[in-house]
Image (spheres, grey):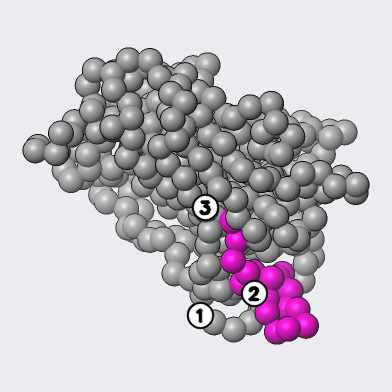
Amino acid sequence: MKDFPVFRALTAVVLVSMVAGCGGGPPAQPDVVLPAADEQVLLVFDDNVIHFLPDEPGKFETVQVGAADNGREIAKVFELERPPAGTRILAEVTTRPIAKDIRDVHDKWDRAGNLRLSVGDGPDVELVKFVTAYGGMTSHLVDITDLAPLFQGTAEIRGFVDTWSSPGWEMDARIRLIPDPTAAAPLWARPLFYEPNVTAESMTTGPLVAEVDIPEDGSWITLHYLTSGHCTDGTGSDEFETKDHVIIVDGAEVYRYRPWRDDCKQFRAINPYCRRWSDGSWSADYSRSGWCPGDKILPHTVDLSAALSPGPHRVEVVIEDIRPKDEDGNLGYWRVSAYLTGRAAPSGDR
C-alpha cells in the first residue's frame, strides 16, 4: 500500500473526557478496535490545531497541513491506491479542546465537525461526521469500507470543526487498513451532495440536486445519507424540532423520514461544560435532530435499487419547513451529505 506506514501498537488509546460538572449517569462506551499486527495506517492529522482567526488564518498552518475557512479547516493531500479485496477500512478521529488554564478551555461549546474526502471535481464525502462534546475530548471510529472505490489517485483529506474560538481544538485523524476476509467493499461509489448550510432560503431556489450515471454493474444500490439539524440561537427548529427529509429520483418521491436522536443522555459524562437547567435536566441530554453532543452521526441507508437502473438519473433532496430567518437573524439549518454505492445483488434477490 503506497505511503501507508505499517502501524504496530500494543494498545488502542481512546480518549474520553471525564471532567466533573455535568454529573450523573455512566459514560458512553467509546469505540475500541485493537490494532492487528499487519494493520496499516495512513496518518492524516496529528495534534493539528483548528481555530477561527479571520485576521491571521495561516497562524497555525504548517508545511504538512494547510488551513482554510479562517483556520477552521485543515487539509493534506495524498496519493492513494485502492485497498485490496478483503480489507476493512476504518476512519478514526479524535478532537480535544485546547486548555485556557487548569480549569477552563477556549471553546466550551458543542461544535459540528467532520473528516472529509475530496476526490476529483465532485462533492466532498464525509468519512466521519460528528459533533464535539461541550468542551470535552472525544474519539470516533467509523467503518468506511463502503468508500473503498474512492480511495485511489490524488485525494485531499480535510478536517473541520465549526469553532468560533482561537485557539479552538486539536485534531488527530488516521485511516486504518485491516486485513479482514469478511470485509466486502462495493463495486463502485458515487458522491452526491455535500451541503453544510441548507436553509429555508436555499430551499426556495430548489432542492439539492445531483445528476448521476449508474454503472451497468452493481444492481444493489444504496443511498448513504448523513444529516444533522441545527439552529443559530439554540432554541426550537431545526435542532430540537426535526423536519421531513424527502428523497426524490427522476421526479418521483421514493423515501421520506425525520432524523432524530433520543439517547443523548448516555453521553452526559463526556460533556464537561454542559449546563443544568432549573427543571433538573442537562443541556447534553436533550433529544436532537439526528445527533447528540459528543457522538458521531452515521449514515442513514436507503435501498434505491428499484429506482436506479443503469444509466443517467436525477437525485434530489428536499427538507421541508425549515425555520426561516427571523427579525433577529436567527434561523434553522441542516448539514447534509450523501453518496451512493453499488454491489452485486445477493443471489435470488433480484
Identify residue type, mark 3: Arg
Q: Is residue 350 magenta?
A: no
Q: Nearer the viewer, residue 172 or 282?
A: 282
The residue sitting at 22% across, 39% down in the picture is 184
Q: Say whether disc 1 or disc 2 marks the residue closer to the N-terminus.
A: 2
Left or right, 344 with reference to 23: left
Residue 251, above or below 93: above
Query: Is the magenta region chiefly helix, strand or loop?
Result: loop
Q: Residue 303's spot in the image, x, y percent? A: 32, 40
Q: Which residue is mark 1?
A: 26
Q: CA distance from mark 1 to mark 2?
A: 13 Å
Element on which disc 3 rests: loop
Depth check, mark 3 against mark 2: the one in front is 3
Q: Say whether disc 3 or disc 2 marks the residue closer to the N-terminus.
A: 2
Q: Is residue 236 visible?
A: yes
Identify residue type, mark 1: Pro
Element on which disc 1 rests: loop
Residue stretch rendered in magenta on the structure: 272-289
Quarter-of-image position of residue 339: top left
The residue sitting at 67% across, 52% down in the picture is 238
Q: Residue 173's spot in the image, x, y percent? A: 51, 44
The residue sitting at 29% across, 22% down in the picture is 309
Image quadrant occupied by the N terminus: top left
Q: Residue 298's spot in the image, x, y percent? A: 45, 50
Element on which disc 2 rests: loop
Q: Which residue is mark 2?
A: 19
Left or right, 252 with reference to 283: left
Mark identifier at residue 258: 3
